[in-house]
Image (cartoon, rainbow, N blue to C red):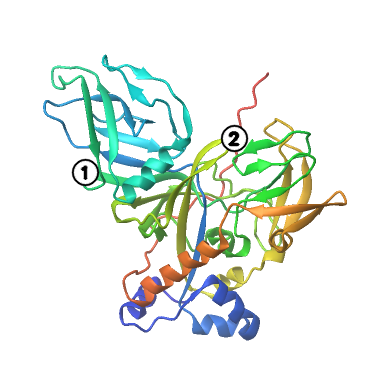
Amino acid sequence: MRTIAEINEKILSGKATVWTIEELKSKVKKLGIKKTYEKVDVICTGTFEPMESSGAILNLGHTDPPMKIRKCWLDGVPAYAGFGAVDLYLGATALSDYSSVNDNGENFPSHTPEKGGSHVIENLIAGKSVSIKAIGQVTDCYPRASFESSITATTINQFYLYNPRNLYQNFIVGVNGGDRTLYTYLGPLLPRLGNAVYSSIGAMSPLLNDPNLEVVGIGTKIFLGGAQGMIVWEGTQHFPLQKRLPNDTPIGPASTLALVGDAKKMSREWVRGCYFKNYGSSLMLGVGIPFPVLSEKVIEHCAVEDEDIVAPVVDFSIPRRVRPSFGLVNYAQLKHGKIKIEGQTVRVASVASMYLGRQVAETLKKWILEGNFTLSEPVAPLRSDSSFISQDGLI
């Protein structure tokens, strides 16, 4: 057994062996698990995919006279202002809800669904100026009633991503057995099984290589949006009790992570606003996790291949929480670009980017080899017994 302290010492002395997850899988095929374990110290994983349960915390700094903001719009997108006087939370899926203000300060509604909080976050990270319009609650200590200006990432105090649910450990494949096109968080699903869409990079995906969350935990340092970030808690809808295959990988959506990182240090290359037609905005985000190779078991789990991991094919034409499934398909089939559903050949596409996921892993590897990124000991494990609660009331 190795320790993280020993691995960090090798990183800082330039003696660590660091491989991406793809390099590791290739080496295992040639060397086997035991010999591979003897050679490698760190394995770098990465992905680039839509993660809509994301957002940013901003602290604007106080105006003069001071103001207690209670309604606020950034480039026309509403930000939540129910914290301190000038603290805001901008959700990635918040949508623009006005385009102009009249002389009386009244908003003219003009819904612009193509622009959301994710695009404002991207613009701030890119160094662009963002307009701000705010309405305050007038009190003795906060007498100002309104405020209108512009901000950049450098003219505010804090600007960091706090993402309640990222990095799903596996997900679903969406199809549409109905007779009209459906617009979903996976993009358009064509009628009569006209296409299938999934949102994972399969065997390269970070948490599918640590299926029981034995390596990562609360306090694990990660690559987040082109900067160093951290796992701060389990993500919302964290469901480690999902049914699993004998190799411990889940057969559908399972564990999730809550992540945080300084957006002022991030890069637009890895944080991009996007829009799904007739659904809304989301955030394309690059996330990478380094795995310290503490035992042969780490190698065993990281050796999993696409044909060893499955996802459920779910029919979105049934408007219920629990939708019918056409069974399970493995990621080798999905990446081939076509699957069979009840004898019908269906075209497949992914909204996650294998190409950019590889670049995340390569960038993280470079940081470690250069001694600019060391590993951290988790301060606590992530829960392994969370059940999934739903709101199934009477209709």
Circle 2 sits on which residue? 389
Compared across the picture, whether 329 is left or right of 144 comes to right
Q: Would you say 151 lies left or right of 342 here?
A: left
Residue 300 point in image, percent of width and height: 61, 72
Report the residue at 58% width, 38% height from top. 277
**131 vs 234: above or below:** above
Q: Amino acid at mark 1?
A: Asn
SS at badge 1? loop
Q: Quadrant of residue 119?
A: top left
Residue found farthest to the left: 64
Q: Label for residue 157?
A: 1
Q: Earlier in the sequence, mark 2 or mark 1?
A: 1
Residue nearest the viewer, comparing 107 with 33 = 107
Report whether residue 114 is seen.
yes
> Which residue appears at 78% of the width and 44% of the height?
193
Kindly report the distance in space between the C-alpha atoms of the residues bearing marks 2 and 1. 37 Å
Q: In this view of the protein, which residue sits in the foreground, 51 or 273?
A: 273
Q: Tag on residue 206?
A: none
Image quadrant of residue 142? top left
